[in-house]
Image (cartoon, rainbow, N blue to C red):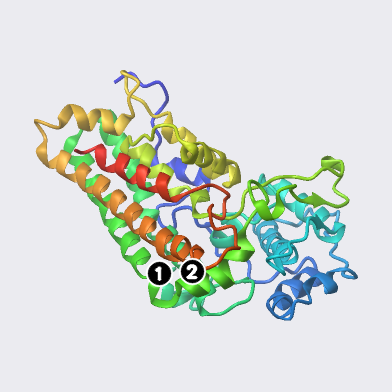
């Protein structure tokens, strides 16, 4: 088979900060404490109490948050840890009073935040990576990354609902890990035109998807829609297409912005790489609409290595310029019914995941918004209208196997 690009192999996963064991979670557990700056470490620890008493803005006026200029001993884990604390502190400052957001971020937060974000290749806003991927610890380091064995390293107000909401995402990321390895093996099988090996890899993908769906199903166990909407959601909004900050946010003292307001999307699960990777692997495409444009924009908020992995996967084509897996499976549909059945199962599970997410969007956001006039409810935390387009993308997923 003449390939436009060389097929990926399992050995390349680590080049993209991805693994078959943890998926897009970091290869090493996130740093629990930030030893490079005691002031920043203390700020992260005190943040929930300062927000609960609405004293964060006042406290930060005289706080010196200094990121050392000599960073030779910093590794990626240190930058991720610093960015986690700074992101939560900055969003806490901005949204401490949700109906009166701050439109200027003081220099003692803005300068180090932009510096650390730049080092990580991310925009200076709370992204999914700092909110979930880099924000957990195992209670027992010898046990798996699962809900009963993980807790958050940083939160806003704290409480069971906030903790559970994020940790469900963390476990989903971990459960997706085996599918990442299977996707690469599946591409190898398609190149070799080995339907039996490909079927085995699709079954591994499906098993991972089943586990992801089961974890997502657990969201209502300990995260109440009313609490989520009123205590968790307000702090993760951004300042692009947000009527509460329609003029954006000024990062005081950040030279590269020249005093001009900036516009960035808020944290959203759309910044996770999982779903677009499954779409790319299974050959699922979505016609243009506001959500597809939004999802493309969300790639800029992903860790650069994850974005590179997704884009590399999207370029895995056969000689007819079709997605590699979907193209080969389509050719085999009539003569390899078991292979087609395994593929259908993966697509059905992707649709199931999207369907559950759509249900949650309705109960956790849309229905809550009808009871309250504020909290930017006509759009998601990323700043885009969501209900109609989530439903459309679900239907497009189902259409692939109809």
**Residue 329 placement: quadrant:** top left
Relative image position of residue 44 (x, y in whole percent): 71, 72
Which residue occupies the foreground of this view, 32 or 348? 348
* Residue visible at 57% across and 69% down in the picture: 232
Task: Tell me the distance, in whole angstroms, between the alpha carbons under discs 2 and 1.
Answer: 7 Å
Q: Is residue 36 above or below residue 121?
A: below
Residue corresponding to mark 1: 219
Mark 2 or mark 1, earlier in chain: 2
* Residue visible at 26% across and 35% down in the picture: 189
Residue corresponding to mark 2: 165
- Secondary structure, mark 2, is helix
Which residue occupies the foreground of this view, 370 or 393? 370
Left or right, residue 113 beside residue 318? right
Q: Are marks 2 and 1 in contact (CB under 8 Å)?
A: yes
Left or right, residue 371 beside residue 355? right
Q: For the C terminus, which image quadrant?
A: top left
Relative image position of residue 105 (x, y in whole percent): 81, 57
Visible in this render: residue 260?
Answer: yes
């Amino acid at each position: 088979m003449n390939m436009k690009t060389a097929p990926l192999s399992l050995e390349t996963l680590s080049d993209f900060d991805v693994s078959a064991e943890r998926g897009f979670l970091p290869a090493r557990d996130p740093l629990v404490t930030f030893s490079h700056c005691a002031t920043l470490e203390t700020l992260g620890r005190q943040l929930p109490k300062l927000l609960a008493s609405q004293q964060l803005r006042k406290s930060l006026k005289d706080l010196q948050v200094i990121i050392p200029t000599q960073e030779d001993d910093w590794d990626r884990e240190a930058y991720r840890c610093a960015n986690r604390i700074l992101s939560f502190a900055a969003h806490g400052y901005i949204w401490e009073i949700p109906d009166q957001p701050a439109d200027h971020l003081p220099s003692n937060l803005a300068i180090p935040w932009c510096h650390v974000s730049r080092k990580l290749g991310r925009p200076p806003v709370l992204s999914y990576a700092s909110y979930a991927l880099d924000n957990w610890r195992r209670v027992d380091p010898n046990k798996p990354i699962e809900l009963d064995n993980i807790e958050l390293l940083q939160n806003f107000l704290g409480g069971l609902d906030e903790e559970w909401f994020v940790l469900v995402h963390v476990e989903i990321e971990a459960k997706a890990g085996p599918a990442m390895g299977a996707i690469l093996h599946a591409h190898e099988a398609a190149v070799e035109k080995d339907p039996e090996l490909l079927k085995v890899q699709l079954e591994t993908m499906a098993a991972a998807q089943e586990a992801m769906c089961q974890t997502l199903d657990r969201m209502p166990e300990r995260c109440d829609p009313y609490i989520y909407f009123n205590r968790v959601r307000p702090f993760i909004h951004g300042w692009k297409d947000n009527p509460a900050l329609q003029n954006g946010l000024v990062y005081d003292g950040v030279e590269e912005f020249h005093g001009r307001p900036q516009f960035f999307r808020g944290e959203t699960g759309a910044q996770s790489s999982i779903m677009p990777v499954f779409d790319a692997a299974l050959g699922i495409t979505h016609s243009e609409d506001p959500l597809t444009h939004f999802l493309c924009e969300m790639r800029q908020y992903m860790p650069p290595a994850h974005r590179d992995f997704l884009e590399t996967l999207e370029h895995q084509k056969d000689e007819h310029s079709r997605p590699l897996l979907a193209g080969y499976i389509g050719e085999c549909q009539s003569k390899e019914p078991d292979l087609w059945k395994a593929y259908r199962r993966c697509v059905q599970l992707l649709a199931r995941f999207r369907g559950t997410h759509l249900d949650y969007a309705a109960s956790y956001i849309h229905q809550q918004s009808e009871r309250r006039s504020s909290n930017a409810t006509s759009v998601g935390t990323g700043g885009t209208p969501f209900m109609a387009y989530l439903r459309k993308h679900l239907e497009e997923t189902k259409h692939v196997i109809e």
